[in-house]
């Protein structure tokens, strides 16, 4: 684990240590004065005798020298605190510095810079080579002008990150070795690390849940709001969470949901009903929180959630939005809710939560330009999930289905940002998705009593890169999933060479891929990143059609979008979009029907079969 500095924790440590030193100095001074007075009285007519002589020897030879030593230690600590305060003044302006994250950000920013330079070079060459195509050269030169601005910002970002790393390393070098000696008298405790909480493990957090009651936990969270994010970043093992929750009474569970809904609602291993209930408690508190600006990312997300749950049309005091959302057709619920993350993170469950006990659960992962905090991002992806759910329900009547519209990671922004060509965001997203998938297994088996849980994962665009990282056999996933569907893939990393490298029950026979022939955006994503195409024969996935089938009343997908819009495609090649009704997840497309069948493991229901 790399170096960590937090100016808030540092300030708290300085304040606490300064107060402790002042208290210790006061106590020691008073003790010295009393001891000196006692020693002066011993041997006089006031206090004399063999017993008093022994006491005098103990005080003179042991206690008083110890008090002098302790006072010297306090003076040393004060000197070190003064040194620490001086060095802290040089670095505190940066707030929070995490060496590992800064190194990752620096590498990613340099990679973005280099990728941008490569794209500009390709554009320049293409402008010359294709100069005969009317307007194309001007368009590419205009695009390079925009990329120049991006490149300048990336260079600035590289310098800023390097400055932060230098400041962190300088602070570490200057303060290393301070506060190593503590007072033997016990008056002053060691200040320890500047940010001790950052080192809490998943097991530590689980112990906190089992040892501390909900009321005390609520007070802890109020004093340290970042605690909820630590549970999100490093949740306890889902099987342990599920077993702990199973042992609680309904009354105890409700107390936990009311006390710390921001933690309970996002704990992998808990059942969907519990998570939805806790998240809706927190959501309704936020809904009426006047300190949340309506145009802030949190404010925008709140409106987006109301739309996604189809409850925005209701208003008035005392409304139960959780109940109203469940009454929708199909039912909906807020399965994940982390509004203070940057960007905000959330997920909506569509369909029957009973699918955890005896049905099929499908997680859907979107691609670039789907990050939350902007209007209609979650509601749009939820609409895609609704269409997938309806297709599954139509294909497999009598089986309970739940589809999760998951935006629990920070997707790459839209072009001209080039991070879609890098893998850092996909790996970060995969880390959380892995925890959610193992949590789904724990919720199904331990809490739901399901002996044969069925979990599918559908990735779209850059979401396919997230998904394949998450279910890689080389990753952290403990329990295999039952189906993986990769639509319009932005590419699979080279360290995942075949479908057999994925932790899927049934192996490559339960890995599917598809892309419309009219989708050039996915092609460009793979070309620019160097990632592989899961449709390649060498990868070994089953490939199905997204071209449409008029005889079956199935529409084609005519662009890269999950949900199409407009009456024309708006451009050519990678600049075009899907038209209304012709995205991958629009309700009457061949793509969504086949994705639904593949996710359900029903090869016989895939229109046109696979190859």
Image (cartoon, grey):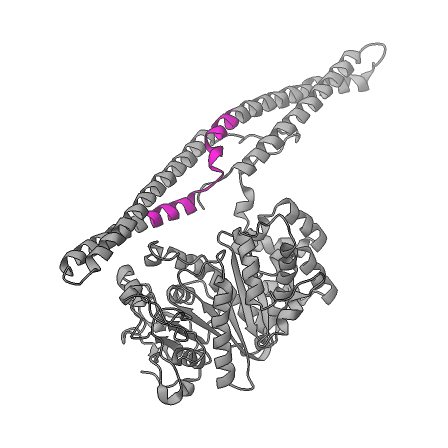
Residue 23 at x, y percent in the picture: 68, 26
- Position of 538 relative to 104 (above/below): below
Start-end of magenta stretch: 83-109
Magenta residue check for 507: no
Magenta residue check for 107: yes
Residue 168 at x, y percent in the picture: 43, 36
- Seen from the viewer's position, the closer of residues 302 and 423 is 302
Q: Residue at x 60, y 71 (%)?
A: 446
- Seen from the viewer's position, the closer of residues 99 and 96 is 96
Q: Residue at x 51, y 66 (%)?
A: 379
- Position of 487 relative to 493 (above/below): below
- Position of 516 relative to 369 (above/below): below
Residue 179 at x, y percent in the picture: 54, 30
Residue 598: which quarter of the image? Answer: bottom left
Residue 246 at x, y percent in the picture: 66, 67
> Can residue 216 be seen by looking at this rendering?
yes
Q: Main secondary structure of the magenta part?
A: helix
Q: What residue occupies the far bottom of the structure in this picture?
A: 551
- Seen from the viewer's position, the closer of residues 253 and 26 is 253
Q: What residue occupies the far top of the structure in this picture?
A: 45
Residue 30: which quarter of the image? Answer: top right
Image quarter hosting the C terminus: bottom left
> Can residue 236 be seen by looking at this rendering?
no
């Amino acid at each position: 684990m790399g170096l960590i500095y937090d100016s808030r924790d540092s300030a708290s440590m300085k304040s606490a240590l300064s107060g402790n030193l002042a208290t210790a100095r006061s106590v020691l001074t008073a003790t010295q004065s009393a001891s000196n007075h006692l020693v002066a009285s011993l041997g006089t007519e006031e206090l004399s005798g063999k017993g008093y002589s022994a006491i005098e020897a103990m005080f003179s030879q042991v206690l008083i020298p110890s008090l002098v030593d302790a006072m010297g230690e306090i003076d040393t600590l004060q000197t070190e605190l003064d040194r620490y305060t001086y060095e802290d003044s040089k670095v505190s302006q940066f707030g929070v510095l995490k060496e590992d994250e800064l190194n990752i950000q620096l590498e990613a920013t340099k990679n973005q810079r280099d990728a941008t330079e490569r794209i500009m070079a390709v554009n320049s060459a293409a402008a010359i080579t294709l100069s005969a195509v009317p307007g194309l050269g001007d368009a590419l030169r205009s695009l390079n002008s925009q990329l120049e601005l991006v490149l300048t910002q990336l260079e600035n970002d590289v310098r800023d990150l390097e400055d932060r790393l230098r400041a962190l390393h300088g602070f570490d070098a200057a303060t290393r070795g301070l506060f190593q000696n503590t007072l033997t008298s016990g008056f002053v405790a060691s200040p320890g690390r500047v940010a001790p909480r950052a080192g809490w493990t998943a097991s530590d957090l689980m112990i906190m849940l089992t040892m501390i009651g909900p009321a005390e936990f609520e007070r802890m969270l109020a004093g340290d709001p970042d605690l909820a994010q630590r549970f999100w970043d490093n949740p306890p093992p889902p099987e342990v969470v599920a077993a702990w929750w199973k042992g609680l009474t309904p009354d105890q569970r409700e107390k936990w949901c009311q006390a710390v809904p921001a933690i309970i609602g996002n704990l992998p291993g808990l059942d969907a009903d519990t998570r939805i209930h806790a998240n809706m408690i927190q959501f309704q508190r936020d809904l009426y929180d006047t300190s949340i600006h309506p145009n802030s990312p949190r404010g925008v997300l709140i409106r987006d959630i109301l739309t996604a749950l189809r409850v925005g049309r209701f208003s008035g005091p005392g409304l139960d939005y959780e109940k109203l959302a469940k009454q929708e057709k199909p039912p909906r619920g807020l399965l994940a809710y982390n509004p203070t993350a940057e960007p905000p993170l959330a997920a909506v469950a569509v369909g029957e939560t009973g699918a955890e006990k005896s049905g099929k659960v499908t997680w859907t992962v979107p691609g670039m330009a789907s990050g939350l905090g902007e209007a209609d991002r979650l509601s749009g992806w939820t609409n895609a999930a609704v269409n997938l759910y309806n297709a599954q329900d139509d294909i497999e009547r009598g089986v309970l289905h739940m589809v999760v519209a998951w935006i629990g990671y920070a997707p790459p922004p839209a072009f001209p940002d080039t991070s879609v060509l890098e893998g850092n965001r996909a790996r970060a997203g995969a880390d959380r998705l892995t925890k959610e998938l193992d949590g789904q297994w724990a919720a199904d088996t331990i809490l739901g009593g399901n002996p044969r849980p069925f979990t599918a994962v559908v990735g779209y665009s850059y979401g396919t890169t997230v998904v394949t990282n998450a279910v890689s056999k080389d990753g952290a996933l403990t329990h295999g999933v039952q189906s993986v569907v990769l639509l319009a893939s932005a590419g699979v990393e080279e360290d995942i060479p075949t479908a057999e490298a994925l932790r899927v029950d049934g192996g490559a026979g339960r890995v599917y891929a598809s892309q419309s022939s009219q989708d050039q955006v996915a092609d460009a994503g793979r070309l620019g990143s160097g990632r592989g195409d899961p449709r390649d024969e060498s990868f070994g996935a089953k490939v199905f059609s997204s071209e449409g089938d008029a005889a079956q009343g199935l529409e084609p997908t005519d662009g890269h979008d999950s949900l199409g819009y407009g009456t024309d495609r708006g451009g050519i090649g990678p600049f075009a979009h899907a038209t209304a009704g012709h995205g991958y997840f629009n309700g009457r497309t061949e793509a969504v029907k086949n994705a639904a069948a593949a996710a359900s493991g029903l090869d016989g229901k895939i229109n046109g079969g696979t190859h």
